[in-house]
């Protein structure tokens, strides 16, 4: 297995490294999008588990995290439009490194949502979507009592990001230090149930409905941040896709079935995503 860090440039001044784990005789490529506030390095065990099964795995670095040359601040802002452009730049780097392989796009949490937004813009970007611990943040897609307080939480996080110039996620214990534009786009989808990106002239909802590939979703049984109902709602937008969901509990995972623990012990998740259907 080759271990690489591929330089990626979006063209607007953003640079980052794309972490790659490439097996001999790879049968497909996977571009993996981390959850909000998570650097690429946290998903390297997952990439290695996938590479052990013959999948050339590339872990994207979000703008503002890890190896990215930018950090969110009052003077440096971006939203979903820029994040989607960064994903396209990573795709170009993968095609240059390994041309012609079948493509899978996947992600954890916010990464899974933006994977869906990416295929809304470019259906040819992937033949399949893999989503782990992901789902729409729309407050009505959550069970009670969580949905009762979510609107206030979303509005508070948006207000804090606007007032501070960026969301101080590391200080408050939610996400990373997130650009206020990202929090604006995220909280809008959370409050309205619909995806859009400021400055992007595209109907993401219509694009999602037109994606015709396969979608595999993994729900972590004790994950209150991405319950089954939120994934069901997200997959409902991909009306043309062939979708399947599996729920993994602690026994199946060999670790806690929460939002994050699987990242350190990813073998069960990798095996279920790759299992014949």
Image: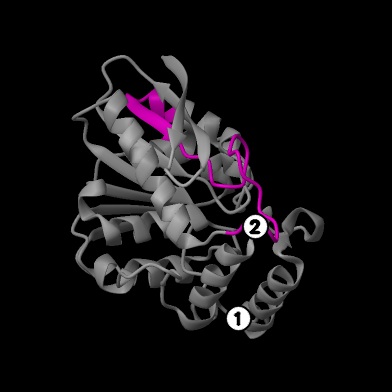
Q: Secondary structure at mark 1?
A: helix
Rendered location of residue 274, percent (x, y): 33, 38
Residue under the image location 76 percent in, 53 percent down: 170
Q: Is residue 133 visible?
A: no
Q: Is residue 38 visible?
A: yes
Rendered location of residue 13, percent (x, y): 51, 43
Does residue 196 appear left or right of residue 96 in this picture?
A: right
Measure the alpha-carbon separation of dots 1 and 2.
Answer: 23 Å
Q: Nearer the viewer, residue 144 or 151?
A: 151
Image: 147 above or below 181 = below
Q: How many dots with numbers?
A: 2
The question of residue 152 being in magenta is answered with no
User: Which labelled disc corresponds to residue 100?
Assistant: none
Rendered location of residue 12, percent (x, y): 46, 47
Q: Main secondary structure of the magenta part?
A: loop
Image: 237 above or below 8 = below
Residue under the image location 26 percent in, 39 percent down: 103
Q: Quadrant of residue 66?
A: top right
Could you classify mark 1 by the number of other residues whose Cα lies within 10 Å: few (under 14), some (14-19), or many (20 or more)?
A: some
- For label 2, the residue is 178
Q: Nearer the viewer, residue 51 or 152?
A: 152
Q: Disc 1 or 2, which lies upstream in sequence?
A: 1
Which stretch appears magenta?
Answer: 49-77
- For label 1, the residue is 147
């Amino acid at each position: 297995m080759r271990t690489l860090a591929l330089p990626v440039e979006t063209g607007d001044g953003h640079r980052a490294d794309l972490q790659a784990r490439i097996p001999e005789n790879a049968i497909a490529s996977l571009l993996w999008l981390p959850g909000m506030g998570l650097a690429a390095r946290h998903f390297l065990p997952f990439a290695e588990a996938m590479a052990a099964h013959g999948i050339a795995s590339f872990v994207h670095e979000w703008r503002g995290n890890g190896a990215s040359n930018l950090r969110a601040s009052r003077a440096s802002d971006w939203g979903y439009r820029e994040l989607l452009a960064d994903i396209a730049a990573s795709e170009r780097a993968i095609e240059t490194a390994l041309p012609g392989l079948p493509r899978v796009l996947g992600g954890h949490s916010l990464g899974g949502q933006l994977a869906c937004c990416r295929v809304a813009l470019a259906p040819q970007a992937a033949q399949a979507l893999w989503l782990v611990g992901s789902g729409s943040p729309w407050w009505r897609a959550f069970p009670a009592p969580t949905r009762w307080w979510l609107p206030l939480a979303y509005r508070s996080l948006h207000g804090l990001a606007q007032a501070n110039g960026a969301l101080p996620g590391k200080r408050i214990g939610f996400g990373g230090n997130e650009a206020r534009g990202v929090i604006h786009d995220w909280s809008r989808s959370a409050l309205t149930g619909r995806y859009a990106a400021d400055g992007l002239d595209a109907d993401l909802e219509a694009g999602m409905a037109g994606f015709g590939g396969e979608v595999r979703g993994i729900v972590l049984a004790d994950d209150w941040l991405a319950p089954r109902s939120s994934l069901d709602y997200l997959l409902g937008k991909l009306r043309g896709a062939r979708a399947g969901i599996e729920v993994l509990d602690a026994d199946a995972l060999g670790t806690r079935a929460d939002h994050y623990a699987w990242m350190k012990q990813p073998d069960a998740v990798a095996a279920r995503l790759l299992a014949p259907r």
